Image (cartoon, helix red, strand yellow):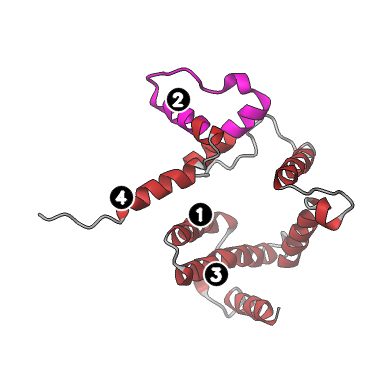
């Protein structure tokens, strides 16, 4: 915890009156691109099995959360302590089999119960349709996977089934096929790309 406290002190200095001119000008909107960039760089490092790179990129991603907290404090919106408190409460609330009296022995049961709790939480928010809470900037395969998963649960009759010339529908059919086989389509495509990207440059 001493290391975390020291990191917060560095963040406070950077975002303070005598801190970095660039840092103190940042807003929620201006930082949004860095959240996506750092998350993608973590994923790339993971698929390259490069621990030193993973360590560095996780640190960068972690700091984007702290940076948001400092901007929020500067604007009087919320604090880093509130971010931590809300996260702690959510983890406890969504793991009643660990922190409560519910007994769940299998990971499948844990996932089912987790989704049930998430669904109850979402009912308290203003959501107009089945997909309102999906972030618009999700990578397209990840977004497709989430949409297909919800269709499978709530409207299985709408899942794309028949062959079509529409390329978008054909991609969605592959996502359905991958889910049925227990394959993460995003990971499958990344792994396939990685095999090609490691090929040596051909001779001229």
Q: Is residue 144 above or below residue 55?
A: above
Circle 4 Cα neighbour tier, 10 Å, few/some/many (<14 / 14–19 / ≥20):
few
- Magenta span of residues: 148-176
Q: Is residue 98 above or below residue 173?
A: below
Mark earlier in primary sequence (2, 3) = 3
Q: Is residue 168 magenta?
A: yes
What mark, if any, has residue 59 been given in the picture?
Answer: 3
SS at mark 1 in the image = helix
Q: CA distance from mark 4 to mark 1?
A: 24 Å
Q: Dot 1 corresponds to which residue?
A: 36
Residue 156, given in percent of the width and then of the height, sits at 62, 23
Q: CA distance from mark 1 to mark 2?
A: 26 Å
Q: Is residue 96 magenta?
A: no
What mark, if any, has residue 196 been given in the picture?
Answer: 4
What mark, if any, has residue 169 been given in the picture?
Answer: 2
Q: CA distance from mark 3 to mark 1?
A: 14 Å
Q: Are marks 4 and 3 in contact (CB under 8 Å)?
A: no
Residue 88, given in percent of the width and then of the height, sits at 77, 60
Q: CA distance from mark 4 to mark 3?
A: 29 Å
**Residue 49 located left or right of residue 58:** left
What mark, if any, has residue 80 been given in the picture?
Answer: none
Give the mark toward the camera: 1 or 2: 2
Q: 21 and 28: which one is in front? A: 28
């Amino acid at each position: 915890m001493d290391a975390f406290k020291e990191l917060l002190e560095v963040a406070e200095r950077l975002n303070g009156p005598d801190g970095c001119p660039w840092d103190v000008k940042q807003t929620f909107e201006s930082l949004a691109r860095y959240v996506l960039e750092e998350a993608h760089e973590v994923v790339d490092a993971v698929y390259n099995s490069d621990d030193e790179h993973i360590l560095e990129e996780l640190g960068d991603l972690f700091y984007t959360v702290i940076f948001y907290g400092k901007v929020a404090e500067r604007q009087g919106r919320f604090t880093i302590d509130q971010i931590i408190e809300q996260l702690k409460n959510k983890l406890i609330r969504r793991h009643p089999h660990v922190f409560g009296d519910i007994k769940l022995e299998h990971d499948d049961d844990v996932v089912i119960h987790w989704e049930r709790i998430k669904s109850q939480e979402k009912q308290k928010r203003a959501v107009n349709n089945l997909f309102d809470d999906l972030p618009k900037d999700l990578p397209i395969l990840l977004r497709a996977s989430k949409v297909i998963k919800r269709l499978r649960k709530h409207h299985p009759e709408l899942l794309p089934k028949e062959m079509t010339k529409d390329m978008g529908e054909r991609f969605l059919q592959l996502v359905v096929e991958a889910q049925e086989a227990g394959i993460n389509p995003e990971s499958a495509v990344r792994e396939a790309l990685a095999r090609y990207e490691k090929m040596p440059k051909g001779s001229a």
